Image: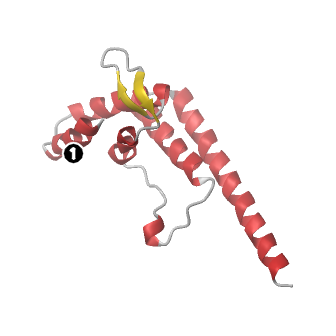
């Protein structure tokens, strides 16, 4: 994943078509195996440590927007679900996988619901503290 993260922008800059295939393969492997240390080059199975940060570089390769706490955006309980949903939708687009696209939509909706519930809870706590 880390090598692709370095390679894909260069291929894009050179106008090469292969970069889409590389990103689609990585997206499919990540969708199947989750965020992993590395993936089997023949099967795409996730191997090594789970939840390892290298595979999160896929978010950058897909151009997915995520909340940025350094720019004043609030990180919420639903942010992870919404980001996961955007990644799945983008991966589904690249691989023509409607099921994966739909999973992404469900994850995004779940994240939005969590954010709404969290906002309501924050407002209720604020009202209770005013007394």
Quadrant holding the C terminus: bottom right
Q: Residues within 10 Å of mark 1 (few under 14, many from 20)?
A: few
Residue 113: percent from the left, percent from the top? 70, 52
Q: Residue at x 53, y 34 (%)?
A: 101
Residue 70, quarter of the rendered image: bottom left
Residue 129 locus on image (x, y percent): 81, 79
Asked if 34 appears above or below 120 in the picture, the reply is above
Quarter of the image for residue 74 reads bottom right
Q: Nearer the viewer, residue 103 or 114?
A: 114
On the rendered image, what quadrant is the N terminus found in?
Answer: top left
Looking at this view, is 88 or 16 the one in front? Answer: 88
Left or right: residue 54 compared with residue 83: left
Residue on which disc 1 sits = 9
Q: Residue furthest top?
A: 42
Specify whether 70 is left or right of 15: right
Q: Residue reaching furthest left?
A: 14
Residue furthest right in the image: 131
Helix, strand or loop at label 1? It is: helix
Q: Residue at x 39, y 33 (%)?
A: 94
Could you say where residue 63 lies in the image, as x and y percent from the top left?
37, 49
């Amino acid at each position: 994943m880390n090598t692709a993260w370095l390679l894909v922008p260069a291929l894009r800059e050179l106008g090469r078509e292969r970069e889409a295939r590389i990103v689609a393969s990585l997206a499919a492997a990540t969708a199947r195996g989750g965020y992993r240390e590395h993936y089997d080059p023949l099967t795409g199975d996730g191997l090594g440590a789970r939840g390892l940060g290298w595979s999160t570089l896929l978010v950058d390769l897909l151009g997915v927007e995520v909340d940025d706490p350094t720019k004043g955006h609030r990180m919420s309980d639903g942010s992870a679900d919404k980001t996961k949903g955007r990644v799945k939708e983008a991966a589904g687009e690249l691989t023509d996988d409607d099921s994966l696209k739909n999973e992404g939509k469900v994850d995004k909706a779940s994240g939005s619901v969590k954010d709404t519930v969290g906002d309501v809870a924050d407002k209720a706590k604020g009202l209770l503290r005013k007394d």
